[in-house]
Image (cartoon, coloured by chain):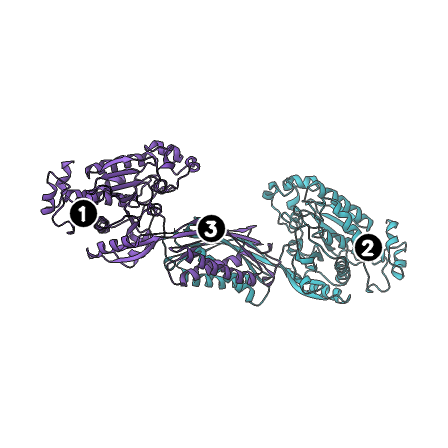
Chain colours: A cyan, B purple
């Protein structure tokens, strides 16, 4: 136990309890509100930017690179300051453990990642890790002994394949180990660099019941909260994704000699479809999104009517069945447009990610933790993928969003306001305490 | 005079006159209808397919290549059979001349080209050349002496830059001589290969008055005539062209985390514009065409909302002012769409070809030549470029279209029916005779 931390404690009864030589002794009022040490958390969020700073507020810290390795060492130090005992598993995940009071209970897990996309932002990942460490540290400082063990986690390589969290879900395969990642290292080389074990990474999958519950705090990566001036997003789940390659066939023809009413212009058909995708996805009930992100027209000359267009179609929703309903509707629209324009549409499905709903009990717990701190909340899907998505394969998960200014993500301009950093960490702390009081034995 | 040709003559008075030892002696009834030798013309159209045949009905005869050189030699032989004296100018144009009765009159010119696009069709070019040769041959065989000299022309390299006809218009520049063409040869090398003179090609521009009138027969390259079951297109002119690069700027964003109503999707804006371009060009009075042929979305990933789209915009019409009116209208539509979608449109003009109206007198002459043979006609623009466009810079031009099955062009499937071949040649013959009776002195 590092006594230097005590200097940052809040005054009063909680502080006094933390000075006890028996730090894990339960408080008389264990459910009394407990605050995080905001300045300490913000300082640590500043300190970790040293590793891979781009100098303009951004972070270039791809997994397995030198900056990632240095930042991992920093987090291990911070974990020790928080009274957590860090270890590294075969997937390179850092697991900072603190025992629980009741023997035989599986751990409550909380955390996120610290690697970044190339030229990414400061809060995406580290916020969730350092807030979870802060929550654990406050519990210890407050002398709160939890029933469940705590396992504060840094998942390895989230941004380029969720390798650490997927390994815990038993989803990492031997085949992918030789894939080169953003750092330039293969996953195999990377695991060796960070203290993992590529030979055993496929064997560490956990089973239902191995983790009581998991909590992840993350900046929103969209502008819903910030747009509505809300404090906390109670994540309903991570959306599923389906993608199709759409091929539209018309008739290539001379752009000068073919009158407007004799054309089968594949790009005009595509244009009507792209517009319809947007209008339909926007006007339907719900939070589904549909996007056409890539398009090409062939032969692709200014003076030739396009005879063929290829474009992507992506639909996301919390419910896979809703994705299919949107798709069915768009197929009908495509048939109508094909008839109007004398073209043919062909849809080729090439990608699916299944949605990962959060646990309804954890949604309530997160919401209540926010409300008890007078924070406004919104139940919302996560449109982006997160480590929580992997953990949801074998454990109840909850996710907490805080507003990200302008909804900016994966950019040096990503920014989470100091008050939102503290709000998010307090909700994690409150939710962990509430979760600790519940029975998470697999039904 | 090659007496073998006489075996193909029609019987009767015309044939008898042609046997005269004074072949250019005027007929008593010089304006009596004179028919072409259809079988001979069709045979020659067959024979010229030998040079560069692709084996599937198509022609691969880029200018300056070996097939082009062999086909040029074939045409010179045919010209001599028709009593024309071929020469080659500095631009590699083959000019087959026959003197006229009145000294000092400039020539009546007729012809087209014989080079093809890679993997092109059989009739595009050779039809105009061999029909003009046939017309001259019939005049000779019928003993018709024209007032004007006749100049039957094979323009060099039409398909890759209209080099021959543009040289006559004084438009070829020294700078373009080193451009590599479809044959793999530069224009300079190509001119040397076909007997031209690259050092003098920029000096052979003709002036107003140097050519009395020019006629070109060509397959339509569109499906207007064939669609309405018409025999002859009386070309009102070759359309002008303007092209723009359109850049639409929105906001690139995460396709999962950005709700539909918070997007500035540049591709949705582009889609609305492409659809509007088509609908507007189609619904306006007139024969204008507008086309978007090339498009790209950036960054161009299935999971990123496009922040920028670039596409071409091409507008063609017989009147340059009409092109500008269509453009102005589309700019207004773009402003409306920009406001709707939260995007910006930028138009960058990069290409203009001025329209080349045909001479009103030659339109009447062509129309009358068709009607006197009970052929149905339609006045129509040429949406494609032709050598006549260059010649229009310094002389009155007329153009005759015959139907092309399915409107197919620049393809091995291009086909002009035998009866349309003959109809077109008869109209050229009739129009040449009528034009010969007119005064073409520059006003």
Please tell me the numbered disc located at residue B294.
3
Badge 2: how crowded within 10 Å, few (<14), some, or many (20+)?
few
Instruction: Judge left or right: residue A391 versus residue A84.
Output: left
Between B417 and B126, the one lying in front of the other is B126
Which quadrant: the C terminus of chain A?
Answer: bottom right
Q: Nearer the viewer, mark 2 or mark 1?
A: 1
**Chain hosting mark 2:** A
Q: Which of the 4 image quadrants contains residue A319?
A: bottom right
Q: CA distance from mark 3 to mark 1?
A: 45 Å
In the image, what residue occupies the spot 85% across and 65% down?
A29
In the image, what residue occupies the spot 88% across and 50% down?
A3
Residues indicated by labels 3 and 1 sit on the same polypeptide chain: yes
Q: Which of the 4 image quadrants contains residue B210?
A: top left
**Chain hosting mark 1:** B
The x, y position of residue A169, in whole percent, is 65, 51
Is label 2 in a helix, a strand or a loop? helix
Please tell me the numbered disc located at residue A288.
none
Q: Nearer the viewer, mark 3 or mark 2?
A: 3
Please tell me the numbered disc located at residue A39.
2
Residue labelled with disc 1 = B36
Q: CA distance from mark 2 to mark 1?
A: 99 Å
Q: Nearer the viewer, mark 3 or mark 1?
A: 1
Is label 3 in a helix, a strand or a loop? loop
Badge 1: how crowded within 10 Å, few (<14), some, or many (20+)?
many
The x, y position of residue A299, in whole percent, is 43, 48
Is label 1 in a helix, a strand or a loop? loop
């Amino acid at each position: 136990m590092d006594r230097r931390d005590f200097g940052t404690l809040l005054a009063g009864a909680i502080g006094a309890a933390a000075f006890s030589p028996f730090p894990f002794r339960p408080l008389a009022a264990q459910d009394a509100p407990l605050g995080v040490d905001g300045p300490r958390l913000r300082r640590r969020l500043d300190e970790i930017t040293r590793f891979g700073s781009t100098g303009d507020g951004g972070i270039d810290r791809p997994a397995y690179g030198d900056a990632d390795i240095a930042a991992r060492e920093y987090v291990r130090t911070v974990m020790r300051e928080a009274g957590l005992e860090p270890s590294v598993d075969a997937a390179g995940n850092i697991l900072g453990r603190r025992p629980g009071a009741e023997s035989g209970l599986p751990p409550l897990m909380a955390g996120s990642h610290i690697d970044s996309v190339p030229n990414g932002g400061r809060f995406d990942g580290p916020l969730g890790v350092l807030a979870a460490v802060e929550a654990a540290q406050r519990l210890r400082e407050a002398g709160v002994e939890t029933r469940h063990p705590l396992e504060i986690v840094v998942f390895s390589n989230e941004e380029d394949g969720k390798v650490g969290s997927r390994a815990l879900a038993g989803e990492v395969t031997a085949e992918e180990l030789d894939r080169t990642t953003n750092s330039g290292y293969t996953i195999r080389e990377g695991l060796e660099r960070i203290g993992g074990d590529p030979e055993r990474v496929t064997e560490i999958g956990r089973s239902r019941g191995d983790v009581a519950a998991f909590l992840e705090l993350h900046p929103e990566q969209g502008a819903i909260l910030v747009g509505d001036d809300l404090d906390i997003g109670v994540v309903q789940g991570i959306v599923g994704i389906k993608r199709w390659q759409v091929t539209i066939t018309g008739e290539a023809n001379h752009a000068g000699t073919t009158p407007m009413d004799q054309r089968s212009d594949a790009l005009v058909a595509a244009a009507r479809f792209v517009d319809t995708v947007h209008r339909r996805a926007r006007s339907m009930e719900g939070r589904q999104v549909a996007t056409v992100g890539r398009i090409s027209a062939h032969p692709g000359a200014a003076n030739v009517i396009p005879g063929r267009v290829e474009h992507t179609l992506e639909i996301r929703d919390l419910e896979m069945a809703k994705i299919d309903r949107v798709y069915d509707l768009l197929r009908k629209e495509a048939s109508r447009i094909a008839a109007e324009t004398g073209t043919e549409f062909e849809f080729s499905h090439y990608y699916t990610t299944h949605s990962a709903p959060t646990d309804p009990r954890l949604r309530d717990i997160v919401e209540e933790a926010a409300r008890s701190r007078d924070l406004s909340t919104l139940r919302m899907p996560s449109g982006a993928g997160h480590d929580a998505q992997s953990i949801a394969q074998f454990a109840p998960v909850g996710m907490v969003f805080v507003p990200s200014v302008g909804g900016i993500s994966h950019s040096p301009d990503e920014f989470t306001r100091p008050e939102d950093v503290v709000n998010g960490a307090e909700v994690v702390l409150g939710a962990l305490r509430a979760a600790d009081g519940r029975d998470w034995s697999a039904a």
